[in-house]
Image (cartoon, helix red, strand yellow):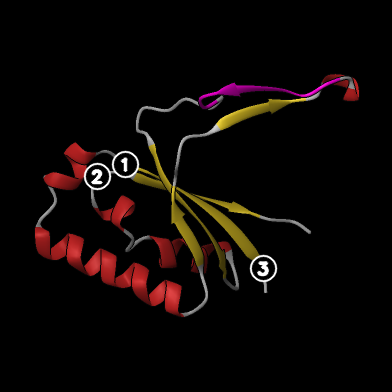
Amino acid sequence: MPKFVTIGYGDREGYDRTAVSVRDEAHAHDSRLRAAGVEMGIAGSPVQVRNPDGAGVSVQEGAFLSSALPIAGFAIIEAGSVEEAVELVSKTPCAVAHGVVEVWPLSG
């Protein structure tokens, strides 16, 4: 079955202005996804790794990517199609709490 990487973006302001019942259902949805085997987690602090021409590793704190909303978390899901993956993530906290979720197909 195809795999997808999802990246959830969201901030506290959007989360707080979402009805508690909607947030609770979104967290319950995440729990059901985890129980079904989805790997997901909250994003920590990133580092950038470079090794130009294999000549030496450099590490820099912070994200390379920038966006209007902070990255909140990641998941790896299996779905039959991108449409099914979209349906699965459309009920997650970032999607319902005024954030956004990207769905990236993985090719193997």
Q: Nearer the viewer, residue 20 or 59?
A: 59
Question: For residue 16, which quarter of the picture?
Answer: top left
**Dot 2 lies on which element?**
loop
Where residue 68 appears, as percent x and y from the top left, is 36, 27
Where residue 55 appears, as percent x and y from the top left, is 89, 20
At label 2, the amino acid type is His
Give the magenta part as a residue range: 56-63
Residue lying furthest bottom: 36
Which one is earlier in the sequence, the residue at label 1 or at label 3? 3
Q: Are marks 2 and 1 in contact (CB under 8 Å)?
A: yes
* Above or below, comparing residue 9 to residue 63 in the picture: below
Quadrant holding the N terminus: bottom right
For marks 2 and 1, give the one nearer the viewer: 1
Which one is earlier in the sequence, the residue at label 2 or at label 1? 1
Question: For residue 93, which quarter of the picture?
Answer: bottom left
* In this rendering, position of residue 14 left or right of residue 44: left
Residue named by callout 2: 98
Disc number for residue 10: 1
For marks 1 and 3, give the one nearer the viewer: 1
Which one is earlier in the sequence, the residue at label 3 or at label 2? 3
**Dot 1 lies on which element?**
loop
Where residue 20 appears, as percent x and y from the top left, is 10, 59
Marks 3 and 2 sit apart, C-alpha to C-alpha, by 28 Å
What residue do we see at 47% from left, 25% from top?
66
* In this rendering, position of residue 84 left or right of residue 71: right
* Above or below, comparing residue 36 to residue 87 in the picture: below
* In this rendering, position of residue 51 left or right of residue 67: right
Residue named by callout 3: 2
Marks 1 and 3 sit apart, C-alpha to C-alpha, by 26 Å
At label 1, the amino acid type is Gly
